[in-house]
Image: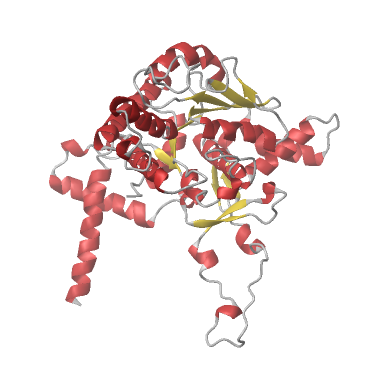
Amino acid sequence: MRVARFLAFGVVAANIVFLIYYTNSSYYAEKIVSSSTLTLKGQLQSAFKYYSVLTQTIPVHCIDPYRQPGYLSIPNATDFSTSRYVPFYEDVLFNRTVDYAVYPAETDNLAFSDSPVPEEILKHSPINWMALLREHVYYSKKTYTHKRKEYIDSQVDWLRNRRILMLSDSVDRYMAIHFCSAIGLEGVFGPGGKHTTAWCTVPSLNFTIYHWHVASMFTFRPDWWWMTEMEYVAWEDRLEHLYLDTLPEVIGMNGYSPDLILYQSSLWDLFAFVKNYQENFKTTEGSGSNKRQIHWSELEFYIQRSRVFIKSIRNLFGNDVPIMYRTAIQHRNAGITDLPLYNLDRAARFVAHQADIEIFDWGKMMAGFQDEFTDNMHVGLGPLSWLYSNMLMYYLFRALGGAEYRGKVVEWPSAKNITMDEAWGECHIYNMNLENR
């Protein structure tokens, strides 16, 4: 009994320490408690208060289905629109029993079925927004009107005049183009070429996903830069010379920012670090190879530059714009050459947590699906791009004040007259956690 009580006290104490740290984070330190002005007793009381909030009374609509462990259901290889992410909910999955898992076995032969996820489980999956949007685009090209069209239009009208901005590499650019292709539209590359801007627009809704290419966190363009036609490399230079003129196109209905921002920088950084070492030390062996960890000096450079990058985004669009870090992906030929990529991703997760930014965890969710790649680093149009697009829609819906739970709308964005900060912040505290060592 004493051991049990001691262990229980230890667990509570550990959570108190975590929550004292949590309430000192940049965003909620102001909104929940100003820890710097509290006594230790006050901090403990606050920690106990929010311990109960975080562990016992999480609003159900704040449970992020895409951060739950789950299963990517792909029932039809030729129709990826049927692909769904199936979160593992305890009351749905672990209360089920199947007769073929009973011991002792009734037979000496066990042939597992390849049947799809049962509907009673699948119905708890996140809303398939992309299927609705694709149907809307189909009807928008028709001249007739009927009840089905009216219903579909009502389900996606919340996207009207909205903007998503991606600040990242070609992986996300491909996803923006695939978004359009999946619903029967065509993506567009900007006049500066694919390594500058690209976008996908749904004209009937004036909804646009815009992509600004980020060419690593490097602070200048080295002479050895492998892409000779790329004039600007540093984020600050690319922003000034390539992207500021496009600001009116990426601004949403609030008049000063997009409705959601997604960022990522790792693949180009990895290549640049290796190439930089090769040029400076004239070797392709050891540290001149990508079969190594990131060096500590490179990691510190990356972390500092990432912080500057995030600050720049907030200076440009304001502190209340919802921002997410898209986790790094594996290469198709994943192996030791991905080791430095994992180093960068862990650092980026740390920076995101410190900057009070949530995680768009697609990079981890699609690990192992190498057959879905079109080359060594780009995912093709298919179930993984469909998953990515549905995740985008889920987070945008939430950013606008909408709420869904287990495949059903709890509240539509139009039902709320709140600020962007309030809309995103309602569930933000429940979705901030530092993970993946």
Question: What residue lies at 65% left-to-right and 64% top-to-bottom?
Answer: 118
* Image location of residue 297, percent across then percent down: 24, 33
Q: Quadrant of residue 179?
A: top right
Q: Is residue 306 visible?
A: no
Q: How is the image coloured?
A: secondary structure
Residue 124 located left or right of residue 337 = right
| In this view, 93 is above or below 182 | below
Between 194 and 291, the residue placed more toward the observer is: 291
Check the picture and name the quadrant holding the N terminus: bottom left
Could you say where residue 184 lies in the image, as x and y percent from the top left?
73, 34
Q: What residue sits 69% from the left and 52% below the top?
A: 77
Dividing the picture into quarters, in which one does residue 385 lie? top right
Task: Locate residue 76: give its quadrant.
Answer: bottom right
Q: Which residue shows up at 60% across the image and 86% down it?
A: 108
The mark tally for this picture is 0
Residue 430 against residue 56 in the figure, above or below: above
Percent coordinates x, y for residue 165 in the rendering = 51, 27
Give percent across and percent down for residue 128. Answer: 64, 46
* 280 shown above or below 132: above
